[in-house]
Image (cartoon, rainbow, N blue to C red):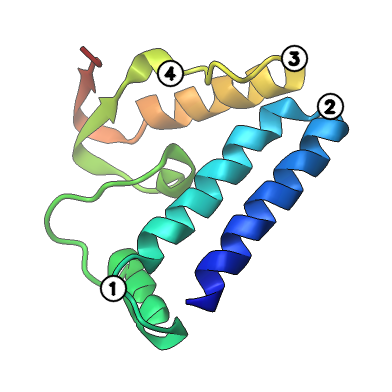
Amino acid sequence: YHLIKKARDYKFRESAKLERAGKTGQIQALQDKVDTLLALCNGTEDLTELRARINSIFNDTEKRGVILSSVHRAKGDEAERVWILKPELMPHPMAQQEWELEQESNLKYVAYTRSKNKLIFVQSE
């Protein structure tokens, strides 16, 4: 539907702007966000269905079961066991500037301190 075309156009337009501004490190983050939105749109017919899907995925009222989360989203949360997927990606390979590396170091600290009892690292193959 219309949102998908608008999201793709936005991704193309904003990526080009970032490229011209020399902000290549931000391009992948933008593309990841738009690609996530497009994946959420898959199988929905309109904004009402998309909103319902997003609410069902990110509803914080239910805390049972496995929670998949970014490190950013996990700030302030704790769990008995925490699995860190692909820890070799911390710091993020796109982080180049000193401030970016410092931010990545802070995120790594957050990731490593979310577990109450057991911290498990899952390496990529």
| Residue 3 horizontal/vertical position (percent) | 54, 73
Give the farthest residue toward the bottom: 48
Residue 106 vs residue 35, the one in the foreground: 35
Q: Earlier in the sequence, mark 2 or mark 4?
A: 2
Q: Amino acid at mark 3?
A: Glu
Q: Residue at x 29, y 71 (%)?
A: 43
Q: CA distance from mark 1 to mark 2?
A: 37 Å
Q: For mark 2, what is the residue? A: 22
Pick whichever of labels 1 and 4 is earlier in the sequence.
1
Q: Is residue 71 above or below residue 119?
A: below
Find disc 1 in the rendering and name its residue: 56
Could you say which disc has been placed on residue 72 in the image? none
Disc 1 and disc 4 in contact, CB within 8 angstroms: no
Q: Looking at the image, is mark 3 or mark 2 earlier in the sequence?
A: 2
Q: Identify which amino acid the numbered label 4 is placed on.
A: Leu
Question: Which numbered circle lies on residue 98?
Answer: 3
User: What is the C-alpha distance between the residues marked 4 and 3?
Assistant: 17 Å
